[in-house]
Every structure is written in C-alpha cells, then in structure tokens.
Image (spheres, grey):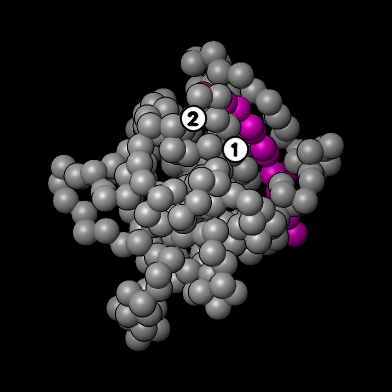
C-alpha cells in the first residue's frame, strides 16, 4: 500500500463527516439507523443518498446547491471517500456526510422512511450475466432500498452504460414502477438542468470521447 493511501486512511480517522463503522457478519444495526436526523444532522431536513459515490463529487455539489437538504455519500473505497470528506471539512459543508460501507449492508444503517431520495451515479454495470444481482438497480438492491426509502421516494440513475440503462428499464417494467424521467441522451434532452449537469471527472472524460449519458428517475 502506497504512502499516499496510508496518509489518506490516517486522515480519514480525523474527519467528523466520515463514518467508518466496524463491520460484523452478519451485519448489526448501526447506532445511527433511524436516528440520522436527531444524532448526526441535528435537523429534520430530507435525507438524500448517493450510492457508489467515489470521490464524492456529486454529493459535494448537491450539498452545496441544496443547503435545505442533507446528503450522504456511500462507498467502500476509503481512499476515494477521503477527497469528498476533506472537501466537506475544508468548505465547512454541514449538510453532508460520508459512510464507508458495502452497499449490500445498507439496510443496517437506515430506518423505515428515513431516506427521501437516492442517486446512483455511474455505477459499475457488472456486464457478466452471472453478476446481475450486483447491479445497484437489480431486484435485489431495489428491495433493499424499499426498507428505508419513503413511499414514492425517487431513485435517480445516471450512467454512460446503455447496457445498465436497458437492464434497469427491464427491472422497472418487471416491478411495474412509475417512471418520471427517461432519456438515452441526457445532454441533448430537455432534462439537462443544473442538477443533472453536475459532471464528475470521469463523466467529463466520457463526454469528450463522445459517449451518451443516460438518465432514469423512477419511484419505488
């Protein structure tokens, strides 16, 4: 492990906005489950999650644009989360947190109706057929989200993978879920507003390469 990664891991331990729980198997309910409003954010503002947030670029931008909401970026890679958490500390962003967990354990961290909205931005599409239940929009994961997402709460998928986009549409149809927005060409559509136009580092690269960005917004 490189010295830079070790330095980031050590600094992560000092960030008040980064939660790194000790995981058990099977996972136990965390002390913040159902209590994020009272015990972490100290307000009753809506909670929005970004799953697989990486460096936290989207989470940071959303938190800055919407100070009336609370945002939590979730990822397993501590070296990546370091960037978002450090930005939050440096810029004193109070309505933002990061949670270092594997997303399959997410139901141990949020209680019923605790989350208002979910963002899934450029996740791994897991192209192999045998990995279909690893996709963050699979039946398996949507059923997990139902345990804590408010009724009619929205799930947003933003992806460069037409494969994942089509797969998600199939899951939505199988579960008969209502779609609010659906586009295969986000930046050529009427939906490219200031929120959807937030671009991560990798998204900027993909756009330069001529890739289309797909977007879905649906409720559970």
Mark 1 Cα shell of 10 Å, populated few (<14), some (14-19), many (≥20): many
Q: Secondary structure at mark 1?
A: strand
Whether residue 149 is visible: yes
Q: Where does the magenta region start and end?
A: 206-220
Q: Nearer the viewer, residue 163 or 180?
A: 180
Query: Total of numbered circles in the picture?
Result: 2
Q: Which residue is mark 2?
A: 150
Q: Secondary structure at mark 2?
A: strand
Which mark is on residue 156? 1
Residue 20, how many percent across, how many down? 31, 62
Identify the residue at horizontal 64%, vertical 32% (top origin): 217
Residue 81, how many percent across, how many down? 44, 65
The mark that comes first in sequence, 2 or 1, is 2
Q: Quadrant of residue 154?
A: top right
Is residue 131 inside the magenta stretch? Answer: no
Q: Nearer the viewer, residue 77 or 160?
A: 77
Image quarter hosting the N terminus: bottom left
Whether residue 145 is visible: no
Image height of 101 relative to 183, above or below: below
Identify the residue at horizontal 16%, vertical 51% (top origin): 24
Mark 2–mark 1 contact, CB under 8 Å? no
Residue 195, how many percent across, how many down? 72, 49
Identify the residue at horizontal 49%, vertical 30% (top origin): 150
């Amino acid at each position: 492990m490189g010295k830079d990664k070790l330095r980031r891991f050590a600094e992560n331990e000092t960030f008040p906005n980064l939660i790194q729980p000790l995981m058990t198997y099977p996972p136990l309910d965390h002390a913040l489950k159902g209590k994020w409003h009272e015990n972490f954010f100290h307000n009753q503002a809506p909670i929005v999650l970004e799953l697989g947030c990486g460096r936290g670029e989207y989470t940071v931008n959303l938190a800055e644009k919407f100070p009336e909401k609370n945002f939590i970026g979730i990822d397993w890679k501590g070296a990546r989360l370091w960037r978002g958490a450090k930005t939050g500390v440096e810029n004193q962003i109070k309505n933002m947190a990061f949670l270092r967990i594997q997303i399959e354990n997410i139901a141990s961290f949020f209680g019923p109706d605790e989350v208002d909205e979910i963002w899934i931005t450029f996740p791994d599409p897991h192209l192999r057929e045998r990995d279909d239940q690893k996709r963050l929009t699979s039946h398996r994961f949507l059923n997990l989200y139902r345990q804590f997402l408010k009724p009619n709460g929205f799930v947003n998928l933003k992806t460069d993978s037409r494969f994942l986009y089509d797969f998600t549409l199939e899951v939505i149809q199988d579960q008969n879920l209502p779609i609010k927005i659906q586009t295969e060409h986000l930046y050529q559509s009427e939906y490219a507003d200031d929120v959807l136009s937030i671009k991560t580092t990798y998204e900027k690269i993909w756009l330069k390469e001529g890739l289309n960005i797909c977007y879905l917004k649906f409720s559970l």
